[in-house]
Amino acid sequence: MMEHRLDRLLRPKSIAIIGGGAFGTNVVEQCLKMNYAGKIWPVHPSRSDVHGVAAFKSLADLPAAPDAAFVAVNRNLTIDIIGQLSALGAGGAICFAAGFRETGNDDADGERLQRELIAAAGTMPIIGPNCYGLINYADGALLWPDQHGGKRLEEGERGVAIITQSSNIACNLTMQQRGLPVAFLMTAGNQAQTGLSEMALGLIEDERVTALGLHIEGFDSVAGFERLALRARELKKPIVAMKVGRSEQARAATISHTASLAGSDAGSEAFLKRLGIARVDSIPSFLETLKLLHTVGPLAGGRLSSMSCSGGEASVMADTAEGRRVGFPALSDETRAGVKEALGPLVAVANPLDYNTFIWNDEPAMTKAFGAFVSGGFDLNMLVLDFPRTDRCSDADWWTAVSAFEAALKANDARGAIVASMLENLPEVHAVELIKRGIVPIHGIVEAFDAAEAAAFIGEAWKKPAAHALGSVRNDELGAPMTTPPPAPMAQPPRKGEVGASVTLDEAEAKALLREAGLAVPKGERVANVEEAVAVARELGFPVALKALGVAHKSEAGAVKLNLHSEGAVRSAATALLPLGSGLYVERMVAGGVAELIVGFTRDPVFGPTMTLGSGGVLVELLKDSATLLLPAATDEIEAALRGLKMFPLLDGYRGRTKSDIAAAIEAVAGIADFVARNADGIEELDINPLIVCGKGDGAWIADALLVSREVS
C-alpha cells in the first residue's frame, strides 16, 4: 500500500474525542459497539469517564499523540483544539462544528474562522468542518457522532469505500439493506483543507477496498481528480460518481447558443468521462453500481443476456434496454441450438429469454438450459428472479434456480446478476449470500441497466491508454497524426480596454481571424451600404448570403437573407437589413450542404475551455442534441462525439440521402478546437453555428461565427 498523508486518520490505532456533549459521547459509544481494538481517549475537563472509558482532563494529559481526533466543540474553540492537536503531532482530525465558510460570503466571521482553522492545523490533515466524519468498517474505528446501520467487515472480507459531501446522505447510506459491503464511509464537509479527491486517494490505497463511490457537489481539484483516476486504474479499483447539479442554470444570461448548452454540469460530465469515472443520477443506481463493481468489476462491453420464466418480464427487460448503450444482441446459431435442445420445441428462444416453467425446480434441466444460454459470451448475464416473502411463503424452489445459475456461470467463466424487479423481493440476507457465490444481487430493473452501463463504460475507458483517456497530452504527442496543420495563433489581439473586459466581435471580425488561422471560411466581405453590397455580391458570384452585423442571433432577429441569386435580390435585402445592425456582410453561399452542426467553446470556471458539438441551426437549443468535450480534445474523441449525436445518421446518408464529408467535418472541428486551445487566454467564447457539412469531398464550412474575446494584458 502506497503511503498517504491520511493513513493515520483513516486507519487509527488511537482515537481522541474532544467534547462532552451528545455528539462527542456518541463517538465513544459507536467505537465500543463496533469492538474497536485501538485506544479510545475521551478528553473532558470535568468528567472522569465516558461510557466507562477513562477520560483525560486535557490534550496535554494524553499518553501519546492520537492517530485521529474527533473535535465536537463550538467553532471558536475548535480552532484552539486543532492548534493543540497539530502541536502534539496528531495524525488528523474531524472538525464537526459548523459556521465556517459554508455559511456564505456574507458571513465575515465564517471566512475569518476558516482561515484561522487552516492556519491552526498546519500540516496536520483535517476533514471538514461541518461534517460527520468517518466510519471505518474494516477496523471498527468510528469517528462518527450518530447511530448508523452498517456492520463491521468480517475477517478477510472486502468492501467498497464511499465519500459524500452530505452528512445526511451518508447517514442514509448506512441504512441500506441491499447487501452492499462497505469498508469505509466518509463525509467531506466544506473541505477547508483536505479535498474530496485527496480523501479518495487515501481510501483506495487500502487493500480491503474494492471500488469507490463519490457523491460530488463540486470538484475540489482538477489535478487531484486526475491523480485519483490514474491511481484507481493502476489499482484496478473502479469509481462511480453521483454528481449533482444537472438542473442548475448554466448561465443567467447568454449571448450564444453554446453558452446555453454548455453549463457547468456539461463540463462535469465531460470531465468524469475523460477520467473514466462512471456517472449515475440516483442513490439506488449509485448503490447497485457499487455492488456490481464490487462483485464482478468493470464489464468488457455492453452485451447483455436476460433469462426469466415470464414473457412479461422478458418484455420489460427488452423495453428497458431501449435507447441505452448496453443491450441484448441476438443469439448465435450455436447458442440458439443449445438452448433449444435444453428447453424443447415449445419455447421460443430469444434474448431476452422466457424459459417458461417447464423446467422449474429441476436443477439439472435448469443448469443445462442456463449453461447453454450464458455460453454465448455475454458481458453480463442477468436472471430475473423475485423471491417470495418468507414470512408467508417458501422460497426453497427459488434457490434451485440460483444454484443452477451459479453452476452455469462457473462452467462458462461468465459474470452474472440476479435482478429483482422490486426492492422488497430480494431480502438483504439473500443478497449477502449471492455475493458470497460471486453473483451480483441487483434491486430493480432500471437500476440493473444503470449499473451495467456504468460498469461497461469503465471497462471501455480502461482499454484506452491512461494519458489518452485523461487528455493530459495532445494527440500529436501520443503519436497520432493531427488531422489539420496547426492553425496560427490569433492574428490580432483582443481589443484594448479594461483588463479582463469581454468584447464581442462581429461576424466579419470573427471570420477574418478564423480564415487567417487556416480554417474553412467562405469568401465574404464587410460592406457599409446597399451599393457596396451589390458590388461585392457581383464579385463573389451568385448565390450569396447577406447578414446584418452586430446581431447575436440573426435568424431569430430576421437579420439574415440566404440564396440571393441576383443584384436586385441583394439590393432589396440590403435595404431591409441595413437598419438592423452595424453594417452588412456579404458572403458566398455554401453549396451542397447535407447537415448543420454547432461547434462552440466556453470557458468553464473549473475545467477551462470546453467544447460543445451538436446539431446546429435554429433548433439547436430545442433539440438539445449535443456532446461536451474538454480541451485539448483528441481526434478520436471528436469523432466519437460526432457519431454519438442523434443527427449523425443524416451525415452518414440516412435512407439513401447524400452522404456527407464526415472526414472534413472531423478535420474542421479539430482545427477549430486547436485554434481555441492556442488562443485560450484571449477567447472567452466562440460560437460557430452552423458549420455546414457538404457532400463527400466538398468539405465542411464555417457559415456563421460569434467570438467573444477578453483583454489579457
Image (tube, rainbow, N blue to C red):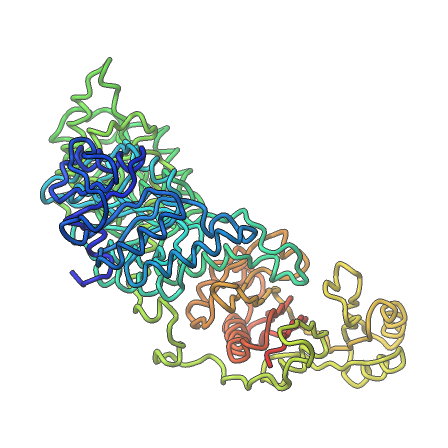
- The answer to which image quadrant residue 591 occupies is bottom right
Q: Residue at x 34, y 46 (%)?
A: 187
| The quarter of the displayed image where residue 193 is located | bottom left
x, y percent for residue 292: 26, 44
In this view, 573 is above or below 56: below
Q: Nearer the viewer, residue 403 or 52?
A: 52
Along the viewing direction, whichever of 473 and 309 lies nearer the viewer: 473
Q: In which quadrant of the rendered image does the C terminus lie?
A: bottom right
Q: Camera-side residue: 236 or 476?
A: 236
Left or right for 132, reference 591: left
Q: Residue at x 52, y 60 (%)?
A: 648
Let me know if residue 565 appears in the view: yes
Q: Furthest residue to the top?
A: 392
Number of callouts in the render? 0
Counting from the top left corner in percent of width and height, residue 667 is at 51, 76
The quarter of the picture where residue 46 lies is top left
Question: Along the horizontal axis of the image, is 245 left or right of 331?
Answer: right
